[in-house]
Structures are given as structure tokens and as C-alpha cells.
Amino acid sequence: MSRDPHLPVLVGVGEVVRRPGDDGPTEPAALAVEAIRAALADAGAGDALLGRVGAVGAVPSAAWTDGDPGRRIAELIGRGDLPTLRSSMQGGNGPQLLVNVLAERIQAGRIDAAIVCGAEALSTVARLAKQGRTPGWPAADPAREPGETLEADRPASTAAENAVGMIAPIMAYPLIENAIGHAAGRTPAQQLDRAARLWSRFSEVATRQPAAWGRPQARSAQELATASAGNRRVTYPYTKLLNANIQVDQGAALILCSAGAAAALGVPRDRWVFVHAGARATDEWFISERRELHRSPAIRACGEALFTRAHVRAEELGPIDLYSCFPAAVQLAARELGLPLDDPARPLTSTGGLTFFGGPGNNYATHGIAAVARRLREAEPGTHGLATALGWYATKHALGLYGNQPPRRAFASLQPAPATPAPRRVIAPAETTAVAETCTLICDRAGEPAYGILFALTEAGDRALAKTDDPAVMAAMSGDGFLGARVALHADRSFDLVQEATHA
């Protein structure tokens, strides 16, 4: 056993997928409980381990919006006495944040063991909605308060962002994607190819995952980048298969306990994965106020804090799972953490990602952590693994460093201060000129552009937001010469192209 009996150890992981046509319940709480039972079996200590659990950390479901999802889960597993925690109602960073908080309490000796779990069932909701029906699940109470909420919910967008139609992740991440490409000097076609090649590698990983949604198949970069009847253009530059797939029925659970409890309960040593350290930080909250859209000071700060504490370098990592709602999210994290995008020995996903594996909503990272843990169990002794999670528009971040040997130092939940530059000032609509910084086109169900969103920088360095539905302007927005071009902004938030950018 480890010399420190309070070291937090991940001893059980469980996942469940309910594909169309499968038998069994799809209620999110029931899926989470099924995953918990699988995790208890995985740990090999069953009800004895369940009896040592001191808290349930539940990730809120978009399909069942109860304010205290952990309460029903605790009751279904026969531990209605347990205190409940939940992460934000709007945050994919939640699973790792729950792990960080509960591991810290285990390290402090406050509890012996804890559960982190969640599930999503938006596939069932969508299927029944087409039939004019609703699921027969117990009524959710959004106002119900859990014992503890780890983060307060707050709006994701400003009035100015909403005014130009940037109201959801599918609008925000293409803006980041195009900003990444423009900052690197790549043409739109080159950047799309880079994203598609990354996602092609992710699709291959998903084919090997038993808990993946549907029946994933490996996809070529060309197939992913090309709009077609089955892969319509959703935004510029993303096709459907470059977006997260939200319509899944999946659940996952993690069982954490102290090393002392694991030893006392007889959990086999080959099940143990040590939680070495966790970190959390937030980037500038509103995307339009970020100094640079292609950077994440928060991810950089978290990575540096974890690597320093554990005396590990990025190139020494074994299994990795970077949060993968859109290619832009993976590229941001890889750059800030010092990880190459295309190292065949170190893929940046252990699941295959939210497009191909599934698990989106708030709970994907529970699956990601489970996948990293499984790979660590099979790795050479002394191997470290990394899992990342994010919420909103690459806004709030939680990272976890794991290992198959005890850490050098006790677990710590770190909150590093990012080296965040001053926010951009966003100006009110006016008649002026600026330079196109990044953009996207939002397409209709037929894959045709419905409107375009522009972020532009004025000569003073302020940011202006604009929108267009002019076909000629939208056609220009996807061209090689648009980003970096001079545009004329108008008081009604529309804009026109004045002069295309020139590139060496």
C-alpha cells in the first residue's frame, strides 16, 4: 500500500450506452446508476465499497434538468443518506471539477470514498419528440437545491454577441477555429484540412471503444471536410461530422477512495489509478472580450501547475484525453500544453471524442477520465495520464493528472492564476472601418449560408462585432483574402468588404 493512506485513488470506472433498439431504461438517473454498478464491479469490492462512499457528485443532465440529480441517483443505489454535490448546469468542465473537489476531501481525510457520475439521454428525448411524446421519467425539479453546488451559473454571451447571432457553441468554436488558422498564416482550406485530419485520427480511436454511441467508423479527412447529403455544412468551416453529436443515451461513473480504504476493502492493486493533482482556471469569460481568440491562458496555467507539481513534462505523458467538442478545442489545448497534434504514439483522445464516441452535454469528461484510467492500468509502471474538460466557449477549464504509481506529493486541487492580458474593449455599432479578425457562416438545414458573423479589430485595437445576410458578402467571407481584409462597419451591425487582404 502507499505510504500515505489518504492518497485519492480511482478504483472503479463504469460506462453504459443504450443504442436505439437496445432494451433497458434511458432515464438519465437510471443510466448513471447502471454505470455506478459497473464501476463498483470494476473495482471488485461491490457493496462493501458502496458502504464507504461519503458523497455523490452528479453532473447535471440536459435531458433531465433536475437541480439535484444526485439525490435520485443516491436513492436508486440505496444510499439516500448521502450528501450530494453537483457541477454547473452549463459546464463540460464539471466531471473533472467534481473529481478535483472530492479527491481533495479524500486526501484531507474528510471522506473515505466518493462517486462522480452523470448521464445524457437526448437521443430518447429527440426520438420521442418526433412522435409528439415525452419520456415517462419522474418529473424534474429545476429549482431543487443539492447539498452543494460547485459553480454558479452565469450567462455565456453578451448582448452584443447575441445581437450578431453568436448564441451557442456551434457559432463560437468556428470563430476560434478560423482565428487559429489566420494567426498561423494558413489559408481556410489548409485550416480545414488540419481540423479534418485531426478528427480523422479521432474517428479511428472511437472504433475501438465498446461504450461508443452508435457504431463508429473510421472517416478519412476528405470525407470529414467535404459537405455531402450525410455531412451537411453546419457552419464555416465545420461540417456536421466536425461537430459534437448531442443526441446520445450514455452514462458514466467513477469511484474514488483513499488508498487506505482501497487496501482495507481488498481492491486489487491493478485497479488502482492515483489522482496526482487537479487544476482549474477560467479564461476571459466573454469570447468577444478575449485579447486573442487563438490562445487559452487558463489551459496553459493549469498545465504548467500540474506538470510542475508532479515533476512531469508534457512529452512524458502516456494516455491523454483532451476535451473534444470541436477541433478548435483540441488545437487550443494541445498548443497551450505543448502537445503535438499528430504524434501517432500519443493520440490526443482516449475515447474518440464527442463526435464519434459521444457523451456530450455536461458529462463527456467522465467518459474521458474513465478511458484514461483504463489505459493507465495497462501501461508501464510510472506512466502518467492527462484528462481535460471545459465549459461554454473554451471558457472554464478543469484538468486532472493521473498515474499508475503513487505521486511524489499529496494530492492538491490547484487554482493557478492565468497570465491573462487585459480584455478587449468591444465597441458599439458605428460607421467605421476595421480589419477582419475572424468570422463564420451559420448554415441552414440545407447547408446553405443563412448569415455570417464577423469579429473585426479597429485601428485602436478595439473589437467590433457585425453580422450579414448579404449573399455576396457571405461568399467573400470563406475566401482566402477575407481575414485580414479591411471592412466597412455600419451602425445597423452590417458590414461590407472594402479591400481584400494581401498575402505574401
Image (cartoon, rainbow, N blue to C red):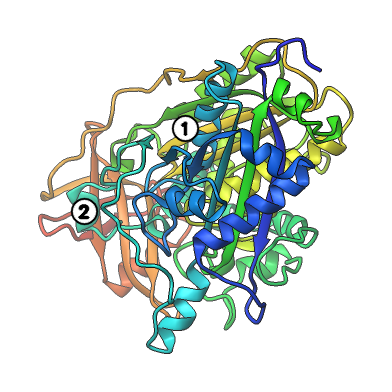
Which residue in the structure is indicated by mark 2? 488
Q: Is residue 32 above or below residue 349?
A: below
Q: Position of residue 32 (x, y in %)?
A: 57, 56
Between 218 and 38, the residue placed more toward the observer is: 38
Between 55 and 399, the residue placed more toward the observer is: 55
Q: Residue at x 63, y 73 (%)?
A: 24
The quarter of the picture where residue 330 lies is top right
Q: Residue at x 76, y 31 (%)?
A: 265
Between 128 and 165, the residue placed more toward the observer is: 128
Q: Position of residue 334 (x, y in %)?
A: 62, 36
Q: Position of residue 46 (x, y in %)?
A: 73, 44
Q: Is residue 74 left or right of residue 162?
A: right
CA gap between label 1 and label 2 equals 29 Å
Q: Earlier in the sequence, mark 1 or mark 2?
A: 1
Q: Amino acid at mark 2?
A: Ala
Q: Is residue 413 left or right of residue 253?
A: left
Q: Position of residue 151 (x, y in %)?
A: 35, 36
Which residue in the structure is indicated by mark 1? 296
Q: Amino acid at mark 1?
A: Ser
Q: Is residue 200 left or right of residue 251?
A: right
Q: Is residue 103 above or below residue 496?
A: above
